[in-house]
Image (spheres, rainbow, N blue to C red):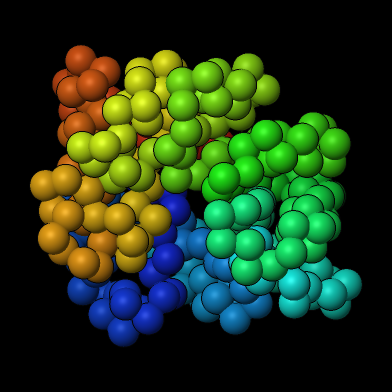
């Protein structure tokens, strides 16, 4: 079985110091490739370094909406230079977070739009973070993302109606262990709608360990197999067939070998 963790933060403190062992456990579990995702200039640089060091690891570089308040034109210029590294396969994560509002909403919109423009220039797909801002995220994508090649809504926890809007726009949807949580029925109903050629899997580690591993405080790629098993059952498929399909969709989206 071959699975790809399409969104992990292996550069975060909870995982970075033990990353070789994290990777070994992941491979043993059947999760054999990883996309480690940047959130700010420092994390972006580390993600690119990790992708250059470990086989079957790739990087995405972007500015998280939490950090939009600190972004200047020079920040975007530096992001563009880093995004041209051969191991970078996407821009992100970027988007809007109106739950915490650590950055003012106009700053979030400005930085999101700038990254969509950059992704179009570099012909890279975009990884979207959207929390308590679904309609606003779709608005920015419609205004500034028409030239972006591919878009995925990461860590999707929305409704079936929102999933349908995402799919009707031609975008992909990625699920974390949240879909296994007892209180996530709307997300499970959304997952049933997503065709296999538009569905991807992720951990978003070190956060949100899936059931039945919720007590493991630091999530890691090895645990993604529980999310895969859960969704395969939800789709009434054999795990091997489900894994093959979502891995193929992931490789198509990110242009992986």
Front one among 137 and 257: 137
Front one among 126 and 254: 126
Report whether residue 111 is seen.
no
Give coordinates of residue 117: x percent, y percent.
Answer: 83, 50
Residue shown at 58% from the left, 67% from the top: 39
- 74 sits left or right of 155 in the view: right
Give coordinates of residue 232: x percent, y percent.
Answer: 23, 25
Location of the N terminus by quadrant is: top left
Front one among 222 and 132: 132
In this rendering, the answer to whether 146 lies above or below 21 is: above
In this rendering, the answer to whether 177 lies above or below 135 is: below
Give coordinates of residue 204: x percent, y percent.
Answer: 39, 56
Residue shown at 46% from the left, 26% from the top: 159
In this rendering, the answer to whether 207 lies above or below 19 is: above
User: What is the residue that sits farthest to the right in this orientation?
Assistant: 73
- 23 sits left or right of 229 in the view: right
- 114 sits left or right of 95 in the view: right
Residue shown at 46% from the left, 62% from the top: 36
Residue shown at 21% from the left, 37% from the top: 182
Give coordinates of residue 61: x percent, y percent.
Answer: 62, 63
């Amino acid at each position: 079985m071959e699975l790809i963790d399409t969104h992990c933060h292996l550069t975060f403190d909870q995982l970075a110091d033990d990353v070789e062992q994290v990777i070994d456990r992941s491979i043993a579990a059947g999760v054999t490739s990883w996309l480690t995702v940047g959130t700010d200039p420092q994390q972006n640089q580390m993600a690119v370094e990790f992708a250059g060091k470990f086989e079957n690891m790739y990087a995405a570089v972007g500015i998280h909406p939490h950090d939009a308040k600190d972004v200047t034109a020079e920040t975007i210029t530096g992001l563009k230079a880093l995004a041209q590294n051969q191991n970078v396969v996407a821009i992100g994560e970027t988007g809007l977070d109106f739950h915490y509002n650590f950055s003012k909403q106009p700053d979030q919109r400005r930085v999101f739009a700038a990254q969509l423009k950059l992704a179009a220039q570099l012909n890279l797909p975009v990884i979207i973070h959207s929390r308590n801002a679904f309609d606003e995220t779709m608005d920015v994508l419609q205004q500034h993302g028409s030239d972006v090649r591919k878009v995925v809504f990461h860590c999707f926890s929305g409704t079936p109606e929102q999933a349908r809007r995402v799919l009707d726009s031609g975008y992909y949807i990625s699920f974390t262990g949240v879909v296994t949580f007892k209180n996530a029925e709307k997300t499970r109903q959304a997952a049933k709608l997503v065709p296999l050629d538009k569905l991807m899997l992720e951990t978003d580690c070190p956060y949100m360990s899936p059931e039945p591993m919720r007590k493991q405080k630091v999530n890691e790629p090895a645990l993604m197999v529980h999310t895969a098993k859960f969704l395969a059952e939800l789709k009434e498929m054999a795990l091997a067939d489900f894994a093959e399909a979502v891995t193929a969709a992931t490789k198509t989206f990110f242009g992986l070998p």
